[in-house]
Image: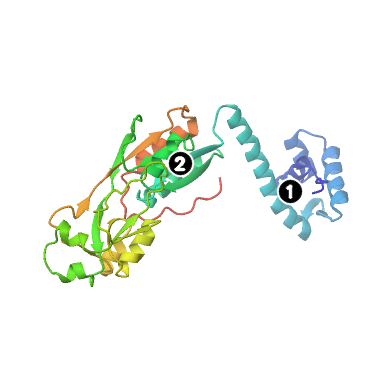
Amino acid sequence: MKAPRVTLDQWRTLQAVVDHGGFAQAAEVLHRSQSSVSYTVARMQEQLGVPLLRIEGRKAVLTEAGTVLLRRSRQLIKQASQLEDLAHHLEQGWEAEVRLVVDAAYPTLRLVHALSAFMPQSRGCRVRLREEVLSGVEEVLKEGAADLAICGMTIPGYLGTALSEVDFIAVAHPDHPLHRLQRTLSATDLEAHMQVVIRDTGRQQPRDIGWLGAEQRWTVGSLATAATFVGNGLGFAWLPCHLIGRELAEGVLKPLPLEEGATHKPRFYLYANKDKPLGPATQILVEMIKSFDSAPLNAPFPPPLADA
């Protein structure tokens, strides 16, 4: 890739001429001589091989090519300024990246709200989001591959901040044989039918939380896949209510009438990497997660944010 022939300073000079109405006005704003500003713009046009300005009366006006190039240059200058700001923030200890691992059962909408609020305060800090299931979250945190973790279980040796509970409910397709029994169901009834469970992504000590011990078990890789399987009559499962609200409303899924254990409400916790002090960006993200943890799950997604 060849080096650019035109410098950022030259683009800034052209912008000043256009924005402030002429060479003299630009020279005053830039604290330079008018001849220096005129030479800079003339040199630009020579280097680019295309006219950028034409003189109409006593005023410099953009050519068609100049209009296109100036518009693109504004983004270039903005990005260069953001790059310099990021370097300044990094020098002050601001993180370049925050690594967040989340149990897939945690409501995505709450994360959307938290990250949307974090974005305008991030100062260029990226968020690397990773989804795991059950003990997979714990392993990622303990391996030092995450700065923050949202987990649906307590992690020994870590002090977690309590977040909200997530409602899980036992469901099956309305035509499933369990519903055709038309009575209250026991654990014995369930053991005779196939259960769909979510694979624990942990490698060291994966857990079978929620599995009843029946031989008929299908293990899938995600909650969405489990919901699709059960919604098509393939077994039963405990699934998060926030994930299957539409299916319940439309009658694609129906709660199982269990005599006990029809629902469970694990509490989620926010953990931090105890071997790494929290930087300023991470601390802001923590506050955003805590603030939006109680956001209504039927709230609309926030509108896209304009570029800062």
Taking the spot 28% from the left edge, 65% from the top edge, the residue there is 235
- Give the residue number, with chain letter if any, for mark 1: 18
Residue type, numbered disc 1: Val
Q: Position of residue 243 (x, y in %)?
A: 33, 57
> In the figure, residue 52 lies in which quadrant?
bottom right
Residue 102, visible in the rendered structure: yes
Circle 1: element type: helix
Taking the spot 24% from the left edge, 47% from the top edge, the residue there is 265
Residue type, numbered disc 2: Leu
Asked if 210 appears above or below 98 in the picture, the reply is below
Q: Position of residue 121 (x, y in %)?
A: 49, 38
State which mark lies toward you, 1 or 2. 2
Going from the N terminus, do you reach mark 1 or mark 2 first? 1
Left or right side of 247 for 222: right
Quadrant where the image shows the C terminus: top right
Circle 2: element type: strand
Q: Position of residue 254 (x, y in %)?
A: 23, 65
- Give the residue number, with chain letter if any, for mark 2: 100
Q: What is the CA distance from the residue labelled 1 to the residue labelled 2?
A: 45 Å
Q: How is the image coloured?
A: rainbow
Residue nearest the observer in this picture, 221 or 252? 221
Q: Position of residue 142 (x, y in %)?
A: 43, 34
Residue 122, visible in the rendered structure: no
Taking the spot 56% from the left edge, 48% from the top edge, the residue there is 307
Residue nearest the observer in this picture, 265 or 121? 265
Task: Check disc 2: other Cα within 10 Å, few if <14, some if 14-19, many if 20+.
Answer: many
Asked if 302 appears above or below 24 in the picture, the reply is below
Task: Check disc 1: other Cα within 10 Å, few if <14, some if 14-19, many if 20+.
Answer: some
Taking the spot 22% from the left edge, 49% from the top edge, the residue there is 264
